[in-house]
Amino acid sequence: MIYFIGAGPGDPDLVTVKAQKILQKADAVLYTGSLVPKEVLSWCKEDAIVEDSQGMKYPEIFEFLEKHQDKLVARVHTGDPSIYSTIAKQIEHLKEQNIEYSVIPGITAAFGAAASLGIEYTIPGVSQTVILSRVEGKTPNPEKLENILACKNSSLAFYLSILLLKKLKKTALEMDYSSDTPCWVVEKATWAEEKIYKGTISDIHEQVGHIRGVALILFGDYLHQKETEESHLYVKPLVKEVEAKKEERKKKKEEANG
């Protein structure tokens, strides 16, 4: 069985119990280079075959999975396997070869960053939609950046885009975003060396121009974390409150009149 495991965004304690148990039993482990904390690999058996997939192309990855298909294999990806992991291509190959697989979810960087910042993505009256995307660079994005930014009442989080921050700024300002729209960057979310930078779309690049590694860009008014209307889930509807008070006054009047 091939297990695709989400190793979380960086903090090894954020690996799920299920994923940890698989790693402890795995005979062969293929992990994604420097993006997976070394503490995660410390759970592997001493005699486990452990290889780094950094620099590998698809044929080499497929060869590893096929070679060890009769063993318990852990294919370890960062974050959650469903986001920017390339598991679709790997699973397609496994299906063609009739090799069994299973996917174990993990915590993606957007959620790890939100926890570090203490923020919510869904603010009543401001945003009820979360968009996880990337700014188009060498890797094409079928959805134009203009279309993504047109969703101004959404909470935007951009992966793999720190080197394209100026493009994000230029496009946002051209689309009439205010120059003081919050734009925050979380470098290596949840890692011990995590760093948080807070600014606006007009000036954030001045703080983060040195970053060349893993970082997440959060952009939008949702970062103000101010509700523009109250959640009906936790606040008693005003109409019902008024009716209840009327009913109470009516009963008191009837009691007073005997």
Image (tube, helix red, strand yellow):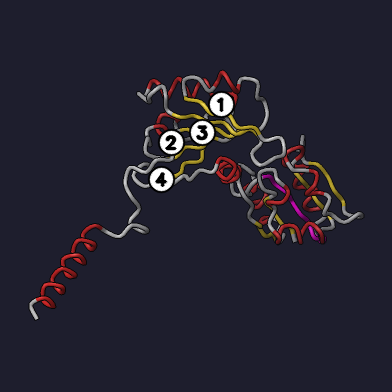
Q: Report which residue position mark 2 lands on.
A: 224
Residue for badge 4: 123
Give yes or no for contact between labels 4 and 1 (Cβ–Cβ under 8 Å): no
User: Disc 1 to disc 2, how far (Cα)?
Assistant: 29 Å
Badge nearest the viewer, 3 or 4? 4
Expressed as whole percent of the image width and height from the top left, the position of residue 169 reads 47, 22
Q: Are marks 4 and 2 in contact (CB under 8 Å)?
A: no
- From this view, report whether residue 107 is shown above or below residue 167: below
**Residue ID for mark 3:** 141
Image quadrant in which the C terminus is located? bottom left
Q: Where 200 sits versus 121, above or below?
A: above
For the magenta stretch, what is the residue range?
70-78
Residue 65 in the image: state x and y as whole percent: 77, 52
Q: Assess disc 3: are there few (<14), some (14-19) or many (≥20) residues with their C-alpha within 10 Å of its C-alpha.
A: few
Q: Secondary structure at mark 3?
A: loop
Amino acid found under the numbered disc labelled 4: Ile
Disc nearer the start of the sequence (2/3): 3
Q: Nearer the viewer, mark 4 or mark 1?
A: 4
Q: Earlier in the sequence, mark 4 or mark 1?
A: 4
How far, Cα to Cα, is label 4 from label 2? 10 Å
Q: Nearer the viewer, mark 1 or mark 2?
A: 2
Of circles 2 and 3, the one toward us is: 2
Labels 2 & 3 near each other (Cβ < 8 A): no
- 234 inside magenta stretch: no
Residue position marked by numbered label 1 in the rendering: 137
